Image (spheres, rainbow, N blue to C red):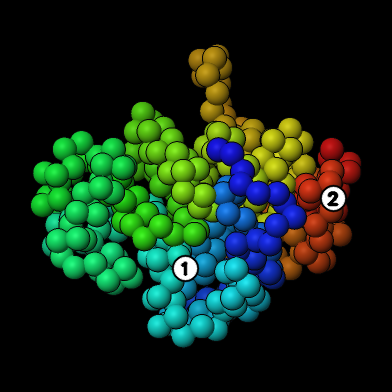
């Protein structure tokens, strides 16, 4: 995907020191701990990490869809407009219009009681004021654009009558209906086979490039990131532990967690019986995160200083940083 504009342009989206606290049965838990990044029109950014690291919470915060009782601090600015603290009416005007999201599981994202045409047309009626016939005509155009087979017949179909890949194309059509400025794709290929995964990712990339949207792609798949996004944020324990241009992150693997993710990838050509390398331990519960580096309990490079405070981002090379006090030694 090609970038639109230079790095010096004012960002479409600017997230600064974003913090989210969730209420749990064991008390308040810090789900996000100071996330900061920028995203410009036409640019692509990836969030990667294991389940529970904060990727989906970041997406829900950007869409104003956090669970009830969540506390949000910091700043989310869309073309300079502050979104943190906005009333629900303001979020409703943005969601499905300037902000759109492709959810992980299309069967749960779609309403089983309404036809495909009606569901695509809903945001067109709400945000663009189209009547029923105009919304249906635009829904048909969108289904053609996302390359759904027999689109005219699918307008009156229900979600259960479509395959997983077809449902995901419908979800993409809904997200694109009003020409959003920012498209968030949360694990958009999780439930699909490998062939359909590639088709869906190529489709998203093509549509983003054509419309000049900004894309925030969430995934746990390093291969997807390598092929799809220009920049990436590696998340763990509710914070960004490494960030930079995708090529630079892959070339240097500066943070021990990034190295662990890379080493755990399956690879073709390994001898029969070869065991994949794994990261020791598991992602801690949000309420059990250590005071220092969130990865310290699983890191083979840990020293006592790692546990005392959250490390600041340290430059690996210009525009590429990692939160690790031993980054120079590891590199």
The C terminus: image quadrant: top right
Residue beneath label 1, please? Answer: 63
Q: Which residue does the image show at 34% across and 38% down from the upper left?
A: 192
Of labels 2 and 1, earlier in sequence is 1
Residue sticking out furthest to the right: 329
**Residue 313 spot, x, y in % from top left:** 80, 57
How many dots with numbers?
Answer: 2
SS for callout 1: helix
Q: Left or right? Give the position of 253 relative to 84.
A: right
The N terminus: image quadrant: top right
Using the image as rendered, state which of residue 64 and residue 210 is in the foreground. 210
Q: Residues within 10 Å of mark 1 (few under 14, many from 20)?
A: some
SS for callout 2: strand
Vertical relation: 199 (above or below) 288:
above
**Residue 28 spot, x, y in % from top left:** 56, 79
Using the image as rendered, state which of residue 213 and residue 164 is in the foreground. 213
Distance from the alpha carbon under mark 2 to that under mark 1? 30 Å
**Residue 131 spot, x, y in % from top left:** 19, 68
Q: Which residue does the image show at 54% across and 28% down from the upper left?
A: 266
Q: Which residue does the image show at 19% across and 60% down from the upper left?
A: 134
Vertical relation: 224 (above or below) 240:
above
Q: Residues within 10 Å of mark 2 (few under 14, many from 20)?
A: some
Q: Which residue does the image show at 61% across and 43% down from the upper left?
A: 3
Using the image as rendered, state which of residue 118 and residue 237 is in the foreground. 118
Using the image as rendered, state which of residue 23 and residue 315 is in the foreground. 315
Which dot marks residue 315?
Answer: 2
The label nearer to you, 2 versus 1, is 1
Res. 281 visible in picture: no
């Amino acid at each position: 995907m090609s970038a639109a504009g230079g790095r010096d342009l004012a960002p479409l989206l600017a997230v600064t020191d974003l913090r989210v606290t969730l209420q749990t049965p064991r008390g308040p838990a810090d789900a996000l701990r100071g996330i900061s990044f920028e995203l410009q029109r036409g640019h692509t950014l990836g969030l990667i990490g294991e389940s529970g690291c904060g990727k989906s919470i970041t997406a829900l915060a950007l869409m104003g869809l956090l669970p009830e009782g969540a506390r949000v601090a910091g700043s989310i600015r869309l073309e300079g407009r502050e979104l943190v603290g906005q009333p629900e009416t303001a979020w409703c005007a943005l969601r499905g219009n300037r902000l759109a999201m492709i959810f992980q599981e299309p069967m749960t994202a779609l309403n089983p009681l309404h036809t495909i045409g009606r569901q695509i047309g809903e945001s067109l009626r709400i945000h663009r004021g189209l009547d029923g016939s105009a919304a249906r005509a635009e829904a048909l155009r969108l289904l053609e654009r996302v390359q759904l087979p027999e689109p005219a017949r699918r307008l009156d179909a229900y979600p259960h009558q479509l395959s997983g890949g077809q449902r995901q194309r419908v979800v993409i059509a809904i997200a694109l209906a009003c020409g959003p400025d920012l498209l968030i794709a949360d694990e958009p290929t999780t439930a699909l086979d490998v062939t359909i995964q590639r088709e869906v990712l190529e489709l998203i990339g093509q549509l983003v490039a054509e419309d000049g949207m900004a894309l925030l792609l969430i995934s746990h798949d390093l291969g997807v990131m390598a092929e799809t996004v220009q920049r990436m944020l590696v998340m763990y324990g509710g914070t960004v532990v490494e960030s930079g241009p995708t090529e630079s992150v892959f070339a240097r693997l500066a943070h021990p967690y990034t190295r662990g993710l890379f080493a755990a990838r399956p690879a073709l050509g390994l001898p029969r019986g070869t065991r994949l390398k794994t990261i020791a331990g598991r992602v801690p519960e949000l309420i059990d995160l250590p005071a220092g580096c969130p990865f310290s309990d699983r890191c083979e490079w840990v020293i006592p200083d790692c546990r005392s405070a959250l490390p600041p981002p340290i430059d690996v090379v210009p525009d590429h940083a990692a939160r690790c006090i031993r980054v120079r030694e590891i590199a």
